[in-house]
Amino acid sequence: MDLISHTLTGVAVGTVFAAISNDDWKRKCSIIFAGGIGGALPDIDAISLWSRFDSTIGSFFGLEHTGREIYAGKFWYSHHAALHSILAPLIIILLAVFITSIVRKNFEISEIRSHFDLKKYSFLAFFFGFLFHLFEDMPTPGSVWGGVNLFFPSSEYIGGYGKIWWWNNYDLFLIIVCVIVLNLTINFVQKFSHKIKMGASISVFVLGFSLFLFQINTRPIDFSYSDHTPNFDNYEAQSKLIQKEILGETVFDIMTKIDGKIPLNF
């Protein structure tokens, strides 16, 4: 899926943990932000497509392969590889705690536990935001990867089901946005008790996720392909036609106009 939808899914996850936390708005915002970072971060492995990758990062590390070869390959640092695994967010969280300990110059177990407890909802939002990114990539075509390396360091890739196209899944994007708006509203209304906020937020997310899965599994076209396909443009055109049928011409036109103004695949 596209990076914008991935990031917003992380934000949606963050709104749930913000409601569960019952913290003040400053901490709620940090939890939501952590979820968004988690939702976006796996795709940092696409940096090998950067036009200056070979002359900078590739040169610095003495890499034998070009950025494009790395991107489409199955090296641990390729796209959909190690950074698209369950292990990756756990390592990142541990690194964050370790770096914090270095900065504070305090490695006492009690202090580390205290830090974990203080930031637990941010860590959870980050972890599950990251995890949902991986889940969202699984229904896309297999292409050169055949899914994501979910259980790295295992060599097995999971997904590549071809149930949705890589991007222009506007219906899924709108579901994500609705979940965010509703959950932010729930978090904002002060007269709601903590239990009501928590229950309502979780319910909204589960309902949105269920609708998300329904939409994924009811596409009338199979987008599956492995390696590369000469039908790439045709698949994309069919994906947009599906969106037009789902959303109606008015909403579809609005979304395509927004899409055209964003300098990313969306």
Image: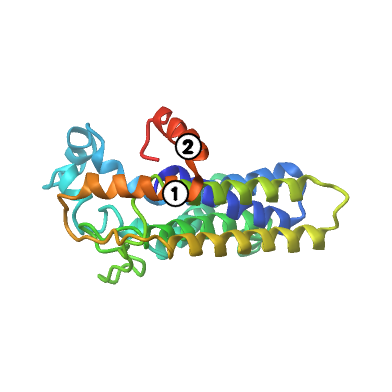
Residue 144 located left or right of residue 5: left
- Quadrant for the C terminus, please: top left
User: Residue drawn 85% across and 47% down?
Assistant: 190
Mark linked to residue 52: none
The amino acid type of the residue labelled 1 equals: Glu
Residue 106 visible in the picture: no
Q: Position of residue 211 (x, y in %)?
A: 55, 61
Mark linked to residue 245: 1
Residue 63 located left or right of residue 83: left
How many circles with numbers are drawn on the protein?
2
Residue 123 located left or right of residue 150: right
User: Residue drawn 19% across and 61% down?
Assistant: 226
User: Residue drawn 81% across and 61% down?
Assistant: 196
Residue 146 visible in the picture: yes
Compared with residue 246, is residue 120 higher up or lower down, i.e. above or below?
Answer: below
Q: Secondary structure at mark 1?
A: helix
User: Residue drawn 77% across and 57% down?
Assistant: 197
Q: Position of residue 208 (x, y in %)?
A: 59, 58
The residue pinned by badge 2 equals 255
How many residues crowd mark 2 within 10 Å: few (<14), some (14–19), many (20+)? Answer: many
Q: Looking at the image, is mark 2 or mark 1 earlier in the sequence? A: 1
Residue 210 located left or right of residue 85: right
Q: CA distance from mark 2 to mark 1?
A: 13 Å
Q: Position of residue 201 (x, y in %)?
A: 70, 58
